[in-house]
Image (spheres, rainbow, N blue to C red):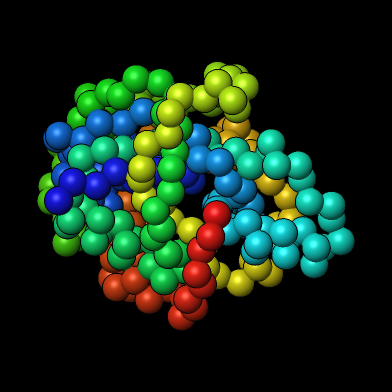
Amino acid sequence: MSHSAFFYGTLLHPSILRRVIGHEGSGLEICPALLQARAHPSQDKNYPAVLPHERSRELFAEAGHEEPPADQRNVRGTLVTGLNDKDIALLDLFEGDEYTRESVLVHPLGPFTALSSTPVPRTTTPSVGAASIPLSQSTTNAYLVPLTAPELPPLDLLPPPLPAQTYIYAGPLSDLSPELWSYEDFVRENAWKWVGRGTVDDNYAEVDRRREMNGSTLKTEVAADI
C-alpha cells in the first residue's frame, strides 16, 4: 500500500528521512507543502509539535496568552508520496508514542521531485538495523532545506489539498512553549546540525537510538482533531 506523509521538524532533512526508512528513497517524491494547523516549539526550541486545535488553545490559555487568529494556522513542511507500509512502520518507531499519526489535508506549494535526486551528505557511521545508504562527498548546502521559504499565497488561493498523514504531538503541554513555531527560525537555528560529517553522524545516532527504544518514548494517548 502506498502512503503520503507530511513532515516538519527534523524529518524535513531528506538524509534524516532516508536514515529512518533505511533506503535512499527510490520511488518517493517530495515537495514543499503547507498544513493548516498550529505547531509550537519545544521549551528548548529543538523541535516543533503540531497540536490539535483544542490543545493549542489550552496551551495559550494556561500561559495567559491570547489565541492567535485563524489565519496563522500555517505549518510549513514537506509532503512525501510513495511511502510503503514498512516505511510507515519505521517512521512510527522513530516518532515513538510521544506522537500519534493522523490523517490530514495538506496543500502542495511546488512541484514534486524525486527524493533520490537530492544529494546525500558523507557519513562514516554504519546503520544499525537499516539498509546501507550510498555516501556522497558533498558537505554543501545543496541537500539542505532552504533557509528561507517563498511567501505563501493568500489562503484562499492555495492549491487544492492532498490527503496525507502526519505526526501530532501527544505529550505534555508543559514541554511546549506557548508561541507559534517558525519554519524559518527552526531551519536557521538547526541547519548547522545538518552540515558536515560529524553533525550528520550525530543525527543518525539519534535515529538509531530511537529505533533501539522501540517507540517507547512516552505512554500517553491523545485523540487529535485539527
| Residue 178 location (% of width, % of height) | 74, 56
Q: Is residue 43 above or below residue 215?
A: above
> Farthest residue in the bottom direction?
219
> Can residue 225 be seen in the rendering of this structure?
yes
Residue 70 position by quadrant: top right
Identify which residue, 128 or 113, lies in the foreground.
113
**Measuring 56% from the left and 41% from the top, which residue is drawn there?**
36
Q: From the viewer's perspective, tell me whether residue 129 is left or right of residue 176.
A: left
Residue 140 position by quadrant: top left
| Residue 118 location (% of width, % of height) | 27, 26
Q: Quadrant of the C terminus?
A: bottom right
Q: Is residue 180 above or below residue 31?
A: below
**Measuring 16% from the left and 61% from the top, which residue is drawn there?**
129
| Residue 141 location (% of width, % of height) | 41, 24
Q: Is residue 142 above or below residue 187?
A: above
| Residue 19 location (% of width, % of height) | 26, 48
Q: From the viewer's perspective, tell me whether residue 9 is left or right of residue 134.
A: right
> Can residue 122 be seen in the rendering of this structure?
no
**Measuring 40% from the left and 21% from the top, which residue is drawn there?**
110
Q: From the viewer's perspective, tell me whether residue 173 is left or right of residue 88.
A: right
Figure label count: 0
**Measuring 65% from the left and 62% from the top, which residue is drawn there?**
54
Q: Is residue 118 above or below residue 66?
A: above
